[in-house]
Amino acid sequence: MPIAHKSSITPEVAYIVWSITETEDELLQHLNLNDEEFDDLNTVKAPSKRLEWLGARTALKHLVNEHGQFYIYKDEFGKPHLKETSIGISMSHARGFGAAAINLKGEVGIDIETERAQIHRIAHKFLHPSEEAWAKGHGEKLTKIWSAKEALYKLHGRTQLTFAEQLIVSDFSNDNQVIGQILENGITEDYKLIYDHLSPIHLCCAY
């Protein structure tokens, strides 16, 4: 089964990117989904998106199996968790790839994206003023900022956040490991951001 990439960032934090070549039935054979997960899957109608949904969970299964058998549930905000453990998890999928991240000692967020022309049209919706000077008009950097903010949003997972105002990404022009900030209720929290590029996928993991 095709693990496209696996990385252990720290002894506690790791992620896997899964290149999906299997059929839906083949992926289901390797997943022991519970009723809640089946209900979640059945809200996805497009066959390609169903495959990506399953690919992300297959990646997660490979990360968590050595720590036990867990079912996924979603809290009232839609954030996924593992039952009966405090291990943090996150998942993402895009264009035939699934990805998952795990943090044994805290929260984690992961996002994968492919670069698309429309990123320029929506940049004003997610760019913080401090990011415009080094990223505005640059498709790859905009894609990476979007991925980073999605990862931070998934890590946070509690309330709605305004991407252009409450999520800030440090200049990564010369570095693939920078700081991301979440601003909420007058409090600023810093998190580490790790970037990776597995053509055509841009990936960011926040922890």
Image (cartoon, rainbow, N blue to C red):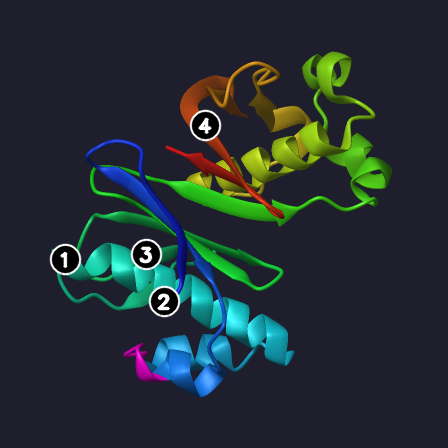
* Label drawn at residue 81: 3
**In the rendered picture of this protein, how many numbered marks are placed on residues?**
4
Which-is-in-front pick, marks 2 and 3? 2
90 is higher (above) or lower (below) than 54: above
Residue under label 2: 58
Residue positioned most to the right? 121
Query: CB under 8 Å between callouts 3 and 4?
Result: no
Distance of label 1 from label 3 (alpha carbons): 17 Å
Earlier in the chain: of badge 1 and badge 3, it is 1
Query: CB under 8 Å between callouts 1 and 2?
Result: no
Left/right placement of residue 22 relative to residue 83 reads: right
Earlier in the chain: of badge 1 and badge 4, it is 1
Q: Nearer the viewer, residue 73 or 151?
A: 151
The residue stretch that appears in magenta: 29-33
Is residue 183 part of the magenta span, yes or no? no
Task: Tell me the kind of residue under disc 2.
Answer: Thr
Query: CB under 8 Å between callouts 2 and 3?
Result: no
What kind of element bears circle 3? strand
Q: Nearer the viewer, residue 106 or 120?
A: 120
Task: Tell me the kind of residue under disc 1.
Answer: Glu
